[in-house]
Image: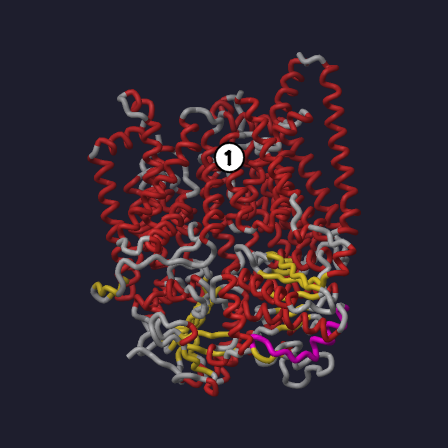
Amino acid sequence: MTPTFARAPRVRIEWLVISITLVVAIAIPFYLEKVSLYWLHVLIIAYFYAILASSWSLLAGVAGQFSFGHMAFMAIGGYTSGLLGKYFGLPPLLGIPAGTLVAGLTGLAIGVLCLRFKASYLALFTIAFSEILRILIRGEYGITRGDQGLHLEMLFGATTSKLPYYFTMLALLVFSLLFMYWLVNSRVGLFLRAIREDEEAASARGVDVVRYKLMAFVITSMIAGLAGGFFAHYIGILTPNTFVLPQMGLVIAMAIIGGVESLVAAAIGGIIIQVSLEVLRDFDAWRLVIFGALLVITLRFARNGLIAPLLERLFGLGPRAEKRKKESDSHGV
Amino acid sequence: MQYFLSLCATGLVMGVIYALMALGLTLIFSILKVVNFAHGEFYMLGGYASYFLLSTFTGLHPLLAVFISGLIVGAIGLVFELIFLRPIHKGQIERPSEYAVLVTVGLSLFLMNLSLAIAGPIPRRPASFLAGTVQLGTVNISAERLIAGVCSLILLGLLLLIINKTWIGKALRAVSQDKDAASIVGINPLAINTIAFAVGAGLAAIAGALLAPIFSVTPDIGATPSIRSYIIIVLGGMGSIPGSILGAILIGLVESLGTGYFPDPTRALNYKMVYGLVIFAIVLLFRPRGLFGRKET
Amino acid sequence: MLRKLRFVFPMLAILAMVLAACQPKPPAVEPTQVAEADVIRIGGFGPLSAPGAYRSGIEMQQAAKMAVDEINLNGGVLGKNVELIFGDTEGLPERGTAVTERLITQNKVVGLIGEYHSGVALTEMEVAHKYGIPVVFSEPWSDDVTGSGYPEIFRISPSIDYYSSIASKYYAATGWKKFVFIQEDTDYGHSSAESITKQLAGYGITDVETIFADPATEDFTPTLQRIMQNPPDVLVSGVTGMGTYRMVRQACDLGLAPTAKTALYAADAQLPEYWENVGDCGQYALFTYVGLPPSLYNDKTRAFLDNFEKLYEVRPGAHAMEAYDSVYLMVEAIRAAGSTEPAAIIAALESIQYDGVLGKIWFEYGSKNPISGDVPKWMWHQFPTPSVYIMQYTEINQPFEESVVVFPREVSTGPLYTGPK
């Protein structure tokens, strides 16, 4: 029963913030290209991790599924495209969709087999899957070049400018966020949250539990695969070390510290952590100690992450505000 | 034949030591219903604790250091449980199972990087229990491994005895089966949780300290044994104590025989972890209750 | 109360992160015009954290820093101080690209030194080539590094091919016929296995088995038990770091090697933590040392080792000496060129003759003396005779300084091979 005039300016602030952020995101590379190509590179990588963190937060925060295989799906996207390019001459623009598809199919297979069980089974199974994949890629040196790394064609050919990569990654981030935002606020998202809260109750009310869980798993696997494909064709080389388990832990930390129930907050968490890892590089080993501690403490004392409550407080974004908005909407109707 | 036997001997000895670590994980899971994703880091801390104990107090007997390491890491586990896991069982946390996964993952990241920052990357090795090799029939086994195996066996036996025969064991079993009923008969489930987590962490640390003179210690050694323990507890049927002991011995044998008889010897070592992982995946798919698991209620 | 805390805590945490982020760090600071005129920047790269071999990378960074400090104490070069900016590659090829890009475009370094991993060096060299910045690689071994023929790339460490030629010459001299290699599954492990198998075949030795393993492998025992069924004349561990120490102990516990029948070769036995990790099993192990053996130390080597131990309280490996000499080579080239123009530095490096910790260093083939005929491609801008010695520990807990040089025979300090009775 919130009066509409009280809500109107808040919505306007939201749009203002979003447009300012977008303008800054679009303008900043032109400045950075003159000042520091390195920080431009850091931003591109940060967007990549933002995609991974936000899609993982969709999986974990909204659908309640704990996968340790997210980086492995990323690697499947990259390696599929790289191998197709190496052995069949497939250009990156065809290889990346192929990689996304293979990541989705692998996700489907794992989902069909695992999603019947409890959350900890999926966690254990995806750890096993990720390790098997890593060992296979290391071991099959003749095909994948193992530890030396698989060289990939650059997405934009010979150009040395980073601008096209920056805008591709930014667009990928924005579109995947928009898509996931739409998904979360659609009927699917509603069902997913219902399943997460009480699987049996949802099932009793006629929600096809396995189907919706599977859908979330496959979609996020594909997003990870897609991001992995672009990442691989930007860096130009892939090694099995890019998806070791501590690296997966880092993605989890990004999503949690940002706020696992808010896609935007998780994405911002990804960007902030990736950038601060660069800034704090001089602290060497201690910076990861700090992030480990921050992760545990955030979980215990700030369940919604560090970014999500801020977003909510300042702009009315975030999960609880969304919930409130929806409630008042339904009241209004 | 002799080759087969020697592979079996190696696998058995390692399997018994794996069992000690897996038993800790099982204990935690069956009581707290939490998979401890920091189990490998407790194992690693055990190795470092025994190294630093032995290099500080030169007169200390290596086996005594192993058990003190277990106590130290058990205490770390205790503190962690009190601060981070107890709130789950007091109902202060929304969606506790997810929280438990994440908070132990966070702990593992923290402990691994903390040890790297403090102890540095150079491999460390605590003093040996006993140098030399023991000849068992036609099979050579290092004295260290044999002692580690025997210690593990004794500890396993002791634990089984405690769990099956003593009051505290009864309380543990009661809490693992029905928390509410247990609290009605006067058992404090919160205290039992804390004890189980501390003992579980301590067991991982003892396994780590027993293997430290054999494999040396660096901050990142936890990953392989922890993944192996997950495999074992799923094989054993999450939460079953005899199941995880049998599962551990099975994995020890599979790793040893798999490496010994893999058709392409060039890759045999590379795929050592894969043999166990494949069995794990198959079991998870077709018999999620585990090979030796009891039916879940 | 709780609700408030929920808000305050994240604010504090973020504030702390922002404060930490705002503290000025040397690499993050943009070089100002004034500073640019005052110093000459040299970039270094190498693994300083996992999954890289950071144990070695950190020593390389320390040695390079020591060289720069010495140079500045003696008045710098071209009237300016030298500044070293060392980037952490984490042993990842993609990080190598990013770090090199940062050093060149942001820190404006005039030359680069270092690197430990071949796989990373191969991507770093592409970036350096793109910008035309000279590189003196200190420790990567892959033939493809100098084999690229890029004008900017120089190397003072041995190539895999060169190293294998010395190792196989030694193996041929011992008369051993049956070999088992356990190699790490990295670029180094694969390419050195390939090269040494080929070269051994040149000596008529074909009974060579190669097994690959992750350097993090815990237990080699099952494979060693299989090898015991038909023991070779020598068991070679081409796994670096902890993998080798584990394998040495496990081979010794099984009674496989070193025995009267089977000799043992252990990579990384030259490192100071060797004895702590292998115990009594370390006796009779053969190993390769890249760098001058103690019997051939010159005054500079001794001074370097003393100073390094004084500063960092550890005896450095050969990779540290290589990093140290790389810095001096780069600075001497700048001095000789009289400018920091890349082309001038490259020309100066091509004709440099420098007496360093590793002995006399020069680059035989380059634009003035192109590669022709039978000379392998990797000889381009390659220090032609890097020190590669086969050594052996003959006593338990023998200090590295007292280990025996067994090959090449001209400089050896003991018999070709000493085995257990």
Residue type at numbered disc 1:
Ile
Q: Is residue A51 visible?
A: no
Residue C109 image position (x, y, % from top left): 71, 62
- Residue B136, quarter of picture: bottom left
Which range is magenta? C341-358
Q: Given the current orientation, which residue lies at the most extreme bottom position?
A: C410
| Residue A206 magenta | no
Residue A245 image position (x, y, % from top left): 50, 48
Instruction: Specify the subunit that label 1 lies on.
Output: A
| Residue C353 magenta | yes
- Residue B81, quarter of picture: top left
Q: Residue at x 67, y 81 (%)?
A: C365
SS for callout 1: helix
- Residue C279, quarter of picture: bottom left
Residue corresponding to mark 1: A297
Q: Residue at x 45, y 67 (%)?
A: C271
Residue B255 image position (x, y, % from top left): 36, 56
Q: Is residue B5 above or below residue B77?
A: below
Residue C58 image position (x, y, % from top left): 54, 60
Here the colouring is secondary structure
Q: Is residue C113 above or below residue A126?
A: below
- Which quadrant is the C terminus of chain C positioned in? bottom left
C90 relative to C173 in the view: left or right: right
